[in-house]
Image (cartoon, rainbow, N blue to C red):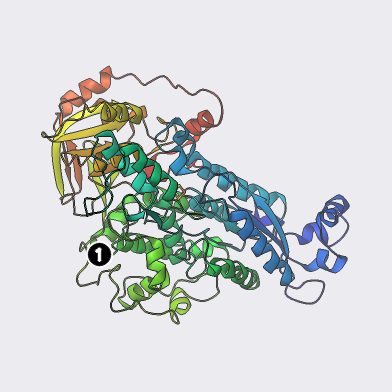
Amino acid sequence: YLDFVRSDETTGIDGKPMLNRYSTHLTREHDFPGAQAMLYGAGVPDSQTMKTAPHVGVASVWWEGNPCNMHLLDLGKEVKKALTARGMLAWQYNTVGVSDAITMGNQGMRFSLQTREIIADSVESVTCAQAHDANITIPGCDKNMPGCIMGMARHNRPSLMIYGGTIDKGYSKTLRKNVNVATCYEAFGAYTFNTLKQPDDGGDTSKTKDEIMEDLERHACPGAGACGGMYTANTMATAIETMGLSLPGSSSTPATSPAKMRECAKAADAIKVCLEKDITPKQLLTKASFENALVITMALGGSTNAVLHFLAMAVTAGVDLTLDDFQRVSDKIPFMADLAPSGKYLMADLYEIGGVPSVQKLLIAAGLLDGSIPTVTGKTLAENVASWPSLPSDQVIIKSLDNPIKSSGHIQILKGNFAPAGAVAKITGKEGLRFSGKARCFDKEVQLNEALNRGEIPRGENLVLIVRYEGPKGGPGMPEQLKASAAIMGAKLTNVALVTDGRYSGASHGFIVGHVCPEAAVGGPIALVKDGDEVTIDAETNTISVDVSEEEMEKRKNAWTPPRMVVTRGVLAKYAALVSDATHGAVTDLF
Ligand code: FES
Protein backbone atom coordinates (compact mmCIF):
# COMPACT_ATOMS: atom_id res chain seq x y z
CA TYR A 1 0.00 0.00 0.00
CA LEU A 2 3.01 2.23 0.33
CA ASP A 3 4.27 1.56 -3.19
CA PHE A 4 1.44 3.26 -5.05
CA VAL A 5 2.79 6.67 -4.10
CA ARG A 6 6.11 6.05 -5.80
CA SER A 7 6.49 7.34 -9.34
CA ASP A 8 7.53 4.80 -11.98
CA GLU A 9 9.37 7.49 -13.88
CA THR A 10 13.11 7.58 -13.63
CA THR A 11 13.87 10.91 -15.31
CA GLY A 12 12.94 14.22 -13.75
CA ILE A 13 11.61 17.29 -15.54
CA ASP A 14 15.18 18.62 -15.63
CA GLY A 15 16.27 15.58 -17.65
CA LYS A 16 18.33 14.23 -14.75
CA PRO A 17 17.71 10.97 -12.86
CA MET A 18 14.59 11.46 -10.79
CA LEU A 19 15.40 11.40 -7.07
CA ASN A 20 12.05 12.75 -5.89
CA ARG A 21 9.94 9.77 -6.86
CA TYR A 22 7.60 10.15 -3.90
CA SER A 23 7.37 13.90 -3.46
CA THR A 24 6.96 14.48 -7.19
CA HIS A 25 3.26 13.63 -6.83
CA LEU A 26 2.88 16.71 -4.66
CA THR A 27 5.20 19.07 -6.46
CA ARG A 28 5.27 18.31 -10.21
CA GLU A 29 1.97 19.78 -11.38
CA HIS A 30 -0.54 21.89 -9.52
CA ASP A 31 -2.79 19.05 -8.34
CA PHE A 32 -1.92 19.86 -4.74
CA PRO A 33 -1.50 23.65 -4.67
CA GLY A 34 -2.10 23.77 -0.93
CA ALA A 35 0.78 21.36 -0.37
CA GLN A 36 3.10 23.46 -2.49
CA ALA A 37 1.97 26.62 -0.74
CA MET A 38 2.82 24.99 2.58
CA LEU A 39 6.22 23.86 1.31
CA TYR A 40 7.09 27.32 -0.01
CA GLY A 41 5.99 28.66 3.34
CA ALA A 42 8.28 26.18 5.08
CA GLY A 43 11.31 27.27 3.07
CA VAL A 44 11.46 25.78 -0.44
CA PRO A 45 13.33 28.55 -2.27
CA ASP A 46 12.11 28.30 -5.86
CA SER A 47 10.06 26.38 -8.39
CA GLN A 48 13.02 24.41 -9.80
CA THR A 49 13.88 23.13 -6.33
CA MET A 50 10.22 22.40 -5.63
CA LYS A 51 9.91 20.24 -8.71
CA THR A 52 13.21 18.38 -8.70
CA ALA A 53 14.84 18.25 -5.27
CA PRO A 54 14.36 15.09 -3.20
CA HIS A 55 12.75 15.62 0.18
CA VAL A 56 14.80 14.03 2.95
CA GLY A 57 13.29 13.64 6.40
CA VAL A 58 15.85 14.07 9.17
CA ALA A 59 14.45 12.40 12.24
CA SER A 60 16.33 12.87 15.46
CA VAL A 61 15.31 11.38 18.78
CA TRP A 62 16.27 14.65 20.45
CA TRP A 63 15.39 15.83 23.86
CA GLU A 64 17.36 17.70 26.48
CA GLY A 65 17.15 15.60 29.58
CA ASN A 66 19.55 12.78 28.73
CA PRO A 67 23.22 12.77 27.68
CA CYS A 68 22.44 10.13 25.06
CA ASN A 69 20.01 12.43 23.25
CA MET A 70 20.76 16.03 24.23
CA HIS A 71 22.98 16.74 21.20
CA LEU A 72 20.94 15.06 18.48
CA LEU A 73 19.17 18.21 17.34
CA ASP A 74 22.58 19.75 16.63
CA LEU A 75 23.62 16.69 14.62
CA GLY A 76 20.36 17.02 12.71
CA LYS A 77 21.12 20.67 11.91
CA GLU A 78 24.52 19.64 10.58
CA VAL A 79 22.88 17.00 8.40
CA LYS A 80 20.36 19.54 7.13
CA LYS A 81 23.16 21.95 6.23
CA ALA A 82 24.96 19.23 4.27
CA LEU A 83 21.80 18.05 2.49
CA THR A 84 20.91 21.61 1.51
CA ALA A 85 24.41 22.20 0.19
CA ARG A 86 23.97 19.16 -2.04
CA GLY A 87 20.68 20.36 -3.53
CA MET A 88 18.29 18.33 -1.41
CA LEU A 89 15.41 19.53 0.73
CA ALA A 90 15.91 18.58 4.36
CA TRP A 91 13.03 18.46 6.80
CA GLN A 92 13.98 18.01 10.43
CA TYR A 93 11.55 16.42 12.79
CA ASN A 94 11.64 14.67 16.09
CA THR A 95 10.38 11.54 17.71
CA VAL A 96 9.95 10.91 21.40
CA GLY A 97 12.36 8.79 23.36
CA VAL A 98 13.12 8.10 27.00
CA SER A 99 16.30 7.59 28.97
CA ASP A 100 16.77 4.04 30.12
CA ALA A 101 19.22 5.01 32.84
CA ILE A 102 16.83 7.59 34.25
CA THR A 103 13.79 5.31 34.24
CA MET A 104 15.75 2.25 35.41
CA GLY A 105 14.38 0.62 38.52
CA ASN A 106 11.36 2.90 38.82
CA GLN A 107 7.89 2.82 37.36
CA GLY A 108 9.02 4.92 34.40
CA MET A 109 10.82 1.87 33.06
CA ARG A 110 7.52 0.38 31.93
CA PHE A 111 7.32 3.19 29.38
CA SER A 112 10.71 2.49 27.84
CA LEU A 113 10.39 -0.44 25.42
CA GLN A 114 7.09 0.80 24.04
CA THR A 115 8.85 4.00 22.92
CA ARG A 116 10.64 1.81 20.36
CA GLU A 117 7.24 1.32 18.74
CA ILE A 118 6.37 5.02 18.99
CA ILE A 119 9.67 5.90 17.32
CA ALA A 120 8.97 3.42 14.50
CA ASP A 121 5.40 4.73 14.22
CA SER A 122 6.68 8.32 14.08
CA VAL A 123 9.31 7.68 11.41
CA GLU A 124 6.85 5.68 9.31
CA SER A 125 4.08 8.27 9.76
CA VAL A 126 6.08 11.38 8.91
CA THR A 127 7.89 9.78 5.96
CA CYS A 128 4.70 8.47 4.39
CA ALA A 129 2.42 11.38 5.26
CA GLN A 130 4.86 14.03 4.06
CA ALA A 131 5.88 12.10 0.91
CA HIS A 132 9.56 12.12 1.82
CA ASP A 133 11.85 10.54 -0.73
CA ALA A 134 14.48 9.49 1.79
CA ASN A 135 15.09 9.38 5.50
CA ILE A 136 18.05 9.94 7.81
CA THR A 137 17.47 8.95 11.41
CA ILE A 138 19.58 10.12 14.36
CA PRO A 139 19.03 8.01 17.46
CA GLY A 140 20.95 8.04 20.75
CA CYS A 141 19.64 5.96 23.65
CA ASP A 142 18.92 2.22 23.65
CA LYS A 143 15.46 1.78 22.10
CA ASN A 144 16.07 4.59 19.64
CA MET A 145 18.14 2.50 17.26
CA PRO A 146 15.78 -0.46 16.69
CA GLY A 147 12.87 1.98 16.63
CA CYS A 148 14.50 3.96 13.81
CA ILE A 149 15.41 0.86 11.82
CA MET A 150 11.89 -0.56 12.20
CA GLY A 151 10.43 2.73 10.97
CA MET A 152 12.84 2.69 8.02
CA ALA A 153 11.89 -0.91 7.19
CA ARG A 154 8.21 -0.05 7.29
CA HIS A 155 8.40 2.86 4.84
CA ASN A 156 11.28 1.22 2.92
CA ARG A 157 12.52 4.39 1.24
CA PRO A 158 16.25 5.13 0.88
CA SER A 159 17.49 5.61 4.43
CA LEU A 160 20.46 5.57 6.72
CA MET A 161 21.08 5.95 10.43
CA ILE A 162 23.56 8.21 12.20
CA TYR A 163 24.28 7.02 15.71
CA GLY A 164 24.46 9.88 18.22
CA GLY A 165 27.68 8.40 19.53
CA THR A 166 29.16 7.09 22.71
CA ILE A 167 29.91 9.18 25.80
CA ASP A 168 33.43 10.01 27.00
CA LYS A 169 34.84 8.40 30.10
CA GLY A 170 34.02 9.88 33.48
CA TYR A 171 36.59 10.08 36.25
CA SER A 172 35.99 9.84 40.00
CA LYS A 173 38.61 11.55 42.14
CA THR A 174 37.38 9.80 45.26
CA LEU A 175 37.58 6.31 43.73
CA ARG A 176 40.58 7.34 41.60
CA LYS A 177 39.36 5.51 38.53
CA ASN A 178 37.33 5.89 35.34
CA VAL A 179 33.63 5.62 35.99
CA ASN A 180 30.43 5.50 34.00
CA VAL A 181 26.73 5.30 34.74
CA ALA A 182 26.90 1.58 35.49
CA THR A 183 29.51 2.29 38.18
CA CYS A 184 26.84 4.30 40.01
CA TYR A 185 24.35 1.45 39.95
CA GLU A 186 26.97 -1.04 41.09
CA ALA A 187 28.17 1.26 43.85
CA PHE A 188 24.60 1.25 45.11
CA GLY A 189 25.03 -2.40 46.18
CA ALA A 190 28.15 -1.57 48.17
CA TYR A 191 26.40 1.57 49.49
CA THR A 192 23.49 -0.53 50.74
CA PHE A 193 25.78 -3.06 52.42
CA ASN A 194 28.01 -0.29 53.86
CA THR A 195 31.06 -1.50 51.98
CA LEU A 196 31.46 1.53 49.68
CA LYS A 197 34.94 2.84 50.49
CA GLN A 198 37.78 4.72 48.85
CA PRO A 199 40.64 2.54 47.66
CA ASP A 200 43.17 1.77 50.36
CA ASP A 201 46.15 2.77 48.21
CA GLY A 202 47.80 5.28 50.48
CA GLY A 203 45.58 8.14 49.31
CA ASP A 204 42.63 9.89 50.91
CA THR A 205 40.18 7.48 52.58
CA SER A 206 38.22 10.07 54.52
CA LYS A 207 35.09 10.36 52.37
CA THR A 208 31.79 9.03 53.66
CA LYS A 209 29.74 6.67 51.54
CA ASP A 210 27.35 9.52 50.73
CA GLU A 211 30.22 11.73 49.60
CA ILE A 212 31.52 8.91 47.40
CA MET A 213 28.08 8.39 45.86
CA GLU A 214 27.72 12.11 45.28
CA ASP A 215 31.12 12.23 43.56
CA LEU A 216 30.21 9.27 41.37
CA GLU A 217 26.88 10.73 40.36
CA ARG A 218 28.49 14.04 39.50
CA HIS A 219 31.27 12.61 37.35
CA ALA A 220 29.95 9.44 35.70
CA CYS A 221 28.48 11.27 32.70
CA PRO A 222 30.88 14.00 31.53
CA GLY A 223 28.81 15.22 28.57
CA ALA A 224 26.79 14.17 25.55
CA GLY A 225 26.74 10.58 24.40
CA ALA A 226 25.18 7.21 25.07
CA CYS A 227 26.36 4.95 27.89
CA GLY A 228 29.95 4.04 27.18
CA GLY A 229 30.24 0.28 27.63
CA MET A 230 29.03 -2.46 25.36
CA TYR A 231 25.58 -1.78 26.71
CA THR A 232 22.43 -1.74 24.63
CA ALA A 233 22.98 1.52 22.75
CA ASN A 234 26.52 0.72 21.65
CA THR A 235 25.49 -2.88 20.95
CA MET A 236 22.69 -1.84 18.63
CA ALA A 237 24.75 0.86 16.93
CA THR A 238 27.59 -1.60 16.33
CA ALA A 239 25.26 -4.22 14.89
CA ILE A 240 23.46 -1.75 12.64
CA GLU A 241 26.77 -0.48 11.27
CA THR A 242 27.78 -4.09 10.61
CA MET A 243 24.49 -4.62 8.77
CA GLY A 244 25.40 -1.76 6.44
CA LEU A 245 22.74 0.72 7.58
CA SER A 246 25.06 3.40 8.94
CA LEU A 247 28.37 4.83 7.82
CA PRO A 248 31.66 3.12 8.68
CA GLY A 249 32.75 4.14 12.17
CA SER A 250 29.37 5.54 13.21
CA SER A 251 29.01 3.26 16.22
CA SER A 252 32.40 3.93 17.78
CA THR A 253 32.84 7.62 16.96
CA PRO A 254 32.30 9.50 20.25
CA ALA A 255 29.36 11.88 20.42
CA THR A 256 31.48 14.95 21.06
CA SER A 257 34.26 14.27 18.56
CA PRO A 258 34.67 16.40 15.43
CA ALA A 259 34.47 13.10 13.51
CA LYS A 260 30.80 12.79 14.53
CA MET A 261 30.11 16.16 12.90
CA ARG A 262 31.99 15.05 9.78
CA GLU A 263 29.85 11.93 9.68
CA CYS A 264 26.79 14.16 9.39
CA ALA A 265 28.19 15.72 6.22
CA LYS A 266 29.17 12.32 4.81
CA ALA A 267 25.65 11.09 5.48
CA ALA A 268 24.34 13.61 2.96
CA ASP A 269 26.61 12.14 0.29
CA ALA A 270 25.56 8.62 1.22
CA ILE A 271 21.83 9.32 1.13
CA LYS A 272 22.27 10.76 -2.34
CA VAL A 273 23.96 7.52 -3.39
CA CYS A 274 21.06 5.57 -1.86
CA LEU A 275 18.59 7.70 -3.82
CA GLU A 276 20.54 7.37 -7.06
CA LYS A 277 21.05 3.63 -6.73
CA ASP A 278 17.65 3.09 -5.14
CA ILE A 279 19.15 1.35 -2.13
CA THR A 280 16.30 0.71 0.30
CA PRO A 281 16.31 -0.58 3.89
CA LYS A 282 14.79 -3.94 3.02
CA GLN A 283 17.62 -4.59 0.54
CA LEU A 284 20.01 -4.20 3.47
CA LEU A 285 17.95 -5.97 6.12
CA THR A 286 18.58 -9.52 4.94
CA LYS A 287 19.35 -12.82 6.56
CA ALA A 288 23.03 -12.23 5.72
CA SER A 289 23.12 -8.81 7.36
CA PHE A 290 21.34 -10.12 10.47
CA GLU A 291 23.91 -12.89 10.58
CA ASN A 292 26.59 -10.16 10.60
CA ALA A 293 24.75 -8.40 13.43
CA LEU A 294 24.78 -11.58 15.49
CA VAL A 295 28.46 -12.20 14.79
CA ILE A 296 29.64 -8.74 15.87
CA THR A 297 27.37 -8.87 18.93
CA MET A 298 28.87 -12.17 20.05
CA ALA A 299 32.44 -11.08 19.29
CA LEU A 300 32.10 -7.83 21.23
CA GLY A 301 29.94 -9.18 24.08
CA GLY A 302 26.85 -7.09 23.33
CA SER A 303 23.71 -6.72 25.38
CA THR A 304 21.04 -9.42 25.63
CA ASN A 305 18.58 -6.72 24.60
CA ALA A 306 20.00 -7.17 21.12
CA VAL A 307 18.12 -10.46 20.91
CA LEU A 308 14.77 -8.77 21.39
CA HIS A 309 15.59 -5.86 19.10
CA PHE A 310 17.07 -7.97 16.28
CA LEU A 311 13.96 -10.18 16.37
CA ALA A 312 11.77 -7.08 16.22
CA MET A 313 13.75 -5.60 13.32
CA ALA A 314 13.64 -8.94 11.48
CA VAL A 315 9.90 -9.38 12.01
CA THR A 316 9.40 -5.85 10.69
CA ALA A 317 11.56 -6.42 7.62
CA GLY A 318 10.10 -9.87 6.93
CA VAL A 319 13.37 -11.71 7.59
CA ASP A 320 13.17 -15.20 9.04
CA LEU A 321 15.27 -14.89 12.21
CA THR A 322 14.63 -17.08 15.26
CA LEU A 323 16.14 -17.67 18.68
CA ASP A 324 17.87 -20.75 17.25
CA ASP A 325 19.93 -18.49 14.97
CA PHE A 326 21.34 -16.75 18.04
CA GLN A 327 22.44 -20.03 19.56
CA ARG A 328 23.93 -21.23 16.28
CA VAL A 329 26.02 -18.08 15.91
CA SER A 330 26.91 -18.00 19.60
CA ASP A 331 28.27 -21.55 19.31
CA LYS A 332 30.74 -20.57 16.57
CA ILE A 333 31.83 -17.01 17.39
CA PRO A 334 34.42 -16.34 20.08
CA PHE A 335 33.79 -13.61 22.65
CA MET A 336 36.81 -11.38 22.19
CA ALA A 337 36.25 -7.93 23.69
CA ASP A 338 37.37 -6.77 27.11
CA LEU A 339 34.59 -4.18 27.15
CA ALA A 340 32.26 -3.19 29.99
CA PRO A 341 30.04 -4.41 31.52
CA SER A 342 31.96 -7.67 31.98
CA GLY A 343 35.30 -6.17 30.90
CA LYS A 344 37.45 -3.13 31.60
CA TYR A 345 37.23 -0.88 28.56
CA LEU A 346 34.69 1.44 27.00
CA MET A 347 33.70 2.21 23.42
CA ALA A 348 35.75 5.42 23.60
CA ASP A 349 38.82 3.20 24.18
CA LEU A 350 37.95 1.04 21.17
CA TYR A 351 37.66 4.22 19.07
CA GLU A 352 41.26 5.08 19.98
CA ILE A 353 42.57 1.83 18.48
CA GLY A 354 40.61 1.99 15.23
CA GLY A 355 37.00 1.55 16.26
CA VAL A 356 34.41 -0.90 15.05
CA PRO A 357 35.57 -0.90 11.37
CA SER A 358 38.96 -2.25 12.48
CA VAL A 359 37.18 -5.08 14.30
CA GLN A 360 35.01 -5.72 11.25
CA LYS A 361 38.12 -5.86 9.10
CA LEU A 362 39.61 -8.51 11.39
CA LEU A 363 36.43 -10.58 11.36
CA ILE A 364 36.00 -10.30 7.59
CA ALA A 365 39.59 -11.47 7.08
CA ALA A 366 38.89 -14.43 9.37
CA GLY A 367 35.84 -15.36 7.32
CA LEU A 368 33.48 -14.75 10.24
CA LEU A 369 31.74 -11.65 8.89
CA ASP A 370 30.21 -11.47 5.42
CA GLY A 371 32.06 -8.58 3.79
CA SER A 372 30.00 -8.86 0.61
CA ILE A 373 26.81 -7.37 2.04
CA PRO A 374 25.73 -4.06 0.47
CA THR A 375 25.71 -0.90 2.58
CA VAL A 376 24.38 2.65 2.51
CA THR A 377 27.60 3.90 0.94
CA GLY A 378 26.79 1.95 -2.22
CA LYS A 379 29.82 -0.21 -1.52
CA THR A 380 30.13 -3.52 0.28
CA LEU A 381 31.06 -3.76 3.92
CA ALA A 382 34.48 -5.11 2.96
CA GLU A 383 35.07 -2.20 0.58
CA ASN A 384 34.05 0.27 3.30
CA VAL A 385 36.64 -0.99 5.76
CA ALA A 386 39.43 -1.86 3.33
CA SER A 387 41.27 1.42 3.90
CA TRP A 388 40.63 1.38 7.64
CA PRO A 389 43.67 0.68 9.86
CA SER A 390 44.06 -2.81 11.26
CA LEU A 391 43.96 -3.16 15.04
CA PRO A 392 47.41 -2.31 16.47
CA SER A 393 49.43 -5.36 17.45
CA ASP A 394 49.94 -4.08 21.01
CA GLN A 395 46.28 -3.31 21.78
CA VAL A 396 44.67 -5.16 24.69
CA ILE A 397 40.94 -4.55 24.18
CA ILE A 398 40.15 -7.07 21.43
CA LYS A 399 41.64 -10.46 22.20
CA SER A 400 42.99 -12.55 19.36
CA LEU A 401 40.84 -15.17 17.67
CA ASP A 402 43.08 -17.96 18.90
CA ASN A 403 43.10 -16.68 22.48
CA PRO A 404 39.66 -15.13 23.08
CA ILE A 405 37.99 -14.48 26.42
CA LYS A 406 35.63 -17.35 25.67
CA SER A 407 35.74 -19.64 22.64
CA SER A 408 32.02 -19.17 21.97
CA GLY A 409 29.58 -16.29 22.32
CA HIS A 410 28.24 -15.03 25.64
CA ILE A 411 24.55 -15.11 24.69
CA GLN A 412 22.92 -18.43 25.30
CA ILE A 413 19.39 -19.41 24.35
CA LEU A 414 17.98 -21.65 27.04
CA LYS A 415 14.94 -23.86 26.80
CA GLY A 416 13.35 -26.36 29.15
CA ASN A 417 10.30 -26.83 31.32
CA PHE A 418 10.93 -23.42 32.91
CA ALA A 419 10.93 -21.62 29.53
CA PRO A 420 9.45 -23.85 26.79
CA ALA A 421 9.59 -21.09 24.14
CA GLY A 422 13.04 -19.91 25.20
CA ALA A 423 14.95 -17.56 27.45
CA VAL A 424 18.06 -15.46 26.92
CA ALA A 425 21.09 -15.74 29.16
CA LYS A 426 24.28 -13.74 29.18
CA ILE A 427 27.08 -16.07 30.19
CA THR A 428 30.58 -14.70 29.86
CA GLY A 429 32.11 -17.71 31.57
CA LYS A 430 33.33 -15.66 34.52
CA GLU A 431 30.31 -16.80 36.54
CA GLY A 432 30.66 -20.47 35.63
CA LEU A 433 28.44 -22.37 33.21
CA ARG A 434 25.96 -24.08 35.52
CA PHE A 435 23.93 -22.83 38.42
CA SER A 436 21.41 -24.63 40.61
CA GLY A 437 19.56 -23.10 43.50
CA LYS A 438 16.32 -22.75 45.40
CA ALA A 439 13.75 -20.48 43.82
CA ARG A 440 12.76 -17.29 45.58
CA CYS A 441 9.95 -15.59 43.68
CA PHE A 442 9.15 -11.90 43.43
CA ASP A 443 6.12 -10.57 41.57
CA LYS A 444 7.68 -7.37 40.12
CA GLU A 445 11.24 -6.11 40.39
CA VAL A 446 10.38 -3.61 43.07
CA GLN A 447 9.76 -6.47 45.51
CA LEU A 448 13.26 -7.82 44.93
CA ASN A 449 14.80 -4.36 45.25
CA GLU A 450 13.05 -3.89 48.58
CA ALA A 451 14.24 -7.30 49.79
CA LEU A 452 17.79 -6.33 48.79
CA ASN A 453 17.51 -2.98 50.52
CA ARG A 454 16.37 -4.73 53.69
CA GLY A 455 19.33 -7.13 53.45
CA GLU A 456 16.97 -10.09 53.13
CA ILE A 457 18.92 -11.97 50.47
CA PRO A 458 21.29 -14.13 52.50
CA ARG A 459 24.77 -15.20 51.47
CA GLY A 460 25.50 -18.92 51.59
CA GLU A 461 22.89 -21.19 50.06
CA ASN A 462 22.46 -20.88 46.28
CA LEU A 463 19.34 -18.93 45.34
CA VAL A 464 17.62 -18.35 42.01
CA LEU A 465 15.88 -15.00 42.38
CA ILE A 466 12.88 -14.97 40.06
CA VAL A 467 11.29 -11.68 39.05
CA ARG A 468 8.03 -12.28 37.18
CA TYR A 469 5.02 -10.46 35.77
CA GLU A 470 7.53 -8.16 34.09
CA GLY A 471 7.14 -9.48 30.49
CA PRO A 472 5.84 -7.51 27.49
CA LYS A 473 2.20 -7.88 28.57
CA GLY A 474 2.74 -8.36 32.28
CA GLY A 475 5.02 -5.39 32.98
CA PRO A 476 3.48 -4.04 30.88
CA GLY A 477 6.39 -3.01 28.73
CA MET A 478 8.99 -5.65 29.68
CA PRO A 479 10.87 -3.24 31.92
CA GLU A 480 14.62 -3.43 31.95
CA GLN A 481 16.21 -4.33 35.25
CA LEU A 482 19.58 -3.14 36.40
CA LYS A 483 19.10 -2.01 39.94
CA ALA A 484 18.85 -5.51 41.40
CA SER A 485 21.63 -7.06 39.31
CA ALA A 486 23.93 -4.10 39.93
CA ALA A 487 23.18 -4.14 43.65
CA ILE A 488 23.92 -7.87 43.74
CA MET A 489 27.23 -7.37 41.92
CA GLY A 490 28.08 -4.42 44.14
CA ALA A 491 27.27 -6.45 47.26
CA LYS A 492 29.31 -9.36 45.84
CA LEU A 493 26.46 -11.83 46.35
CA THR A 494 27.96 -14.68 44.33
CA ASN A 495 25.42 -17.24 45.52
CA VAL A 496 22.56 -15.91 43.41
CA ALA A 497 21.31 -16.12 39.84
CA LEU A 498 18.62 -13.81 38.48
CA VAL A 499 15.80 -14.98 36.23
CA THR A 500 13.00 -12.86 34.79
CA ASP A 501 10.38 -12.67 32.06
CA GLY A 502 11.41 -9.03 31.77
CA ARG A 503 14.75 -7.79 30.48
CA TYR A 504 18.09 -6.85 31.90
CA SER A 505 19.90 -3.67 31.17
CA GLY A 506 22.82 -3.97 28.79
CA ALA A 507 24.93 -2.90 31.76
CA SER A 508 23.85 -5.93 33.80
CA HIS A 509 26.18 -8.83 34.33
CA GLY A 510 26.45 -11.85 36.57
CA PHE A 511 24.45 -15.08 36.16
CA ILE A 512 21.34 -13.61 34.59
CA VAL A 513 18.53 -15.04 32.46
CA GLY A 514 15.82 -12.85 30.94
CA HIS A 515 13.10 -12.85 28.27
CA VAL A 516 11.62 -16.05 29.77
CA CYS A 517 8.85 -17.10 27.41
CA PRO A 518 5.93 -17.69 27.80
CA GLU A 519 5.75 -14.92 30.33
CA ALA A 520 3.99 -15.09 33.70
CA ALA A 521 1.09 -12.86 32.62
CA VAL A 522 -0.10 -15.53 30.16
CA GLY A 523 0.41 -18.40 32.63
CA GLY A 524 3.89 -19.52 31.57
CA PRO A 525 5.74 -21.90 33.91
CA ILE A 526 7.56 -18.94 35.48
CA ALA A 527 4.20 -18.00 37.05
CA LEU A 528 3.82 -21.46 38.56
CA VAL A 529 7.21 -21.83 40.24
CA LYS A 530 7.12 -21.61 44.04
CA ASP A 531 9.69 -20.58 46.64
CA GLY A 532 11.94 -23.54 47.39
CA ASP A 533 11.62 -25.28 43.99
CA GLU A 534 15.02 -26.25 42.64
CA VAL A 535 15.88 -24.34 39.44
CA THR A 536 18.85 -25.27 37.26
CA ILE A 537 20.45 -23.12 34.59
CA ASP A 538 22.90 -25.00 32.40
CA ALA A 539 24.76 -23.09 29.70
CA GLU A 540 26.42 -26.26 28.43
CA THR A 541 23.18 -28.03 27.64
CA ASN A 542 21.36 -24.72 27.00
CA THR A 543 18.60 -25.59 29.42
CA ILE A 544 16.67 -23.95 32.19
CA SER A 545 14.55 -26.31 34.23
CA VAL A 546 12.61 -26.54 37.44
CA ASP A 547 12.61 -29.76 39.39
CA VAL A 548 8.83 -30.10 39.55
CA SER A 549 6.90 -32.92 37.88
CA GLU A 550 4.68 -32.33 34.88
CA GLU A 551 1.63 -33.40 36.88
CA GLU A 552 2.40 -30.93 39.66
CA MET A 553 2.92 -28.11 37.14
CA GLU A 554 -0.39 -29.00 35.50
CA LYS A 555 -2.10 -28.87 38.89
CA ARG A 556 -0.57 -25.47 39.60
CA LYS A 557 -1.62 -24.25 36.15
CA ASN A 558 -5.22 -25.23 36.80
CA ALA A 559 -5.17 -23.36 40.09
CA TRP A 560 -3.52 -20.26 38.55
CA THR A 561 -5.63 -17.21 37.81
CA PRO A 562 -4.43 -14.47 35.50
CA PRO A 563 -3.59 -11.27 37.32
CA ARG A 564 -5.93 -8.33 36.95
CA MET A 565 -4.55 -5.81 34.46
CA VAL A 566 -3.51 -2.84 36.55
CA VAL A 567 -3.22 -0.55 33.54
CA THR A 568 -6.49 -0.24 31.67
CA ARG A 569 -6.17 3.02 29.74
CA GLY A 570 -3.44 5.00 28.02
CA VAL A 571 -0.35 4.04 26.12
CA LEU A 572 0.62 1.05 28.28
CA ALA A 573 -2.86 -0.44 27.98
CA LYS A 574 -2.64 -0.13 24.19
CA TYR A 575 0.81 -1.69 24.27
CA ALA A 576 -0.25 -4.61 26.47
CA ALA A 577 -3.20 -5.31 24.18
CA LEU A 578 -1.13 -5.32 20.98
CA VAL A 579 2.29 -6.64 21.91
CA SER A 580 3.67 -9.94 20.62
CA ASP A 581 5.73 -12.25 22.81
CA ALA A 582 9.47 -11.81 23.28
CA THR A 583 10.37 -14.54 20.78
CA HIS A 584 8.79 -12.31 18.13
CA GLY A 585 10.56 -9.20 19.36
CA ALA A 586 7.64 -7.76 21.37
CA VAL A 587 6.41 -5.74 18.39
CA THR A 588 2.96 -4.20 18.20
CA ASP A 589 2.11 -4.68 14.52
CA LEU A 590 2.14 -8.46 14.21
CA PHE A 591 -1.42 -9.70 13.89
FE1 FES B 1 20.92 6.04 27.11
FE2 FES B 1 22.33 4.28 28.55
S1 FES B 1 20.73 5.59 29.22
S2 FES B 1 22.40 4.65 26.42
**Mark 1 element type:** loop
For the point 45% across and 51% down, the residue is: 221
Q: Is residue 506 left or right of residue 240?
A: left
Residue with the mark numbered 1:
334
x, y percent for residue 66: 52, 46
- How many other residues sit within 10 Å of disc 1, few (<14), some (14-19) or many (≥20)? many
Give the vertical position of 175 relative to 13 (above or below). Answer: above
Front in this rendered view, residue 325 or 175: 175
Q: For the point 45% across and 73% down, which residue is it?
A: 381
> Is the residue 133 above or below the residue 511 in the image?
below
Q: Is residue 185 left or right of residue 61?
A: left
Provide residue 39's location: percent of width, then percent of height: 82, 55
Is 281 left, or right, of 126 in this rendering? left
Q: Position of residue 251 (x, y in %)?
A: 46, 63
For the residue pair 336 and 57, the one nearer the viewer reads as: 336
Quarter location, residue 208:
top left
Q: Quadrant of residue 547?
A: top left
Q: Is mark 1 within 8 Å of ligand 1?
A: no
x, y percentage for residue 346?
A: 36, 60
Q: Is residue 192 left or right of residue 24?
A: left
Q: Is residue 380 above or below residue 114?
A: below
| Residue 279 seen in render | no
Residue 171 visible, this angle: yes
In the orientation shown, which residue stands out farthest toward the bottom?
Answer: 387
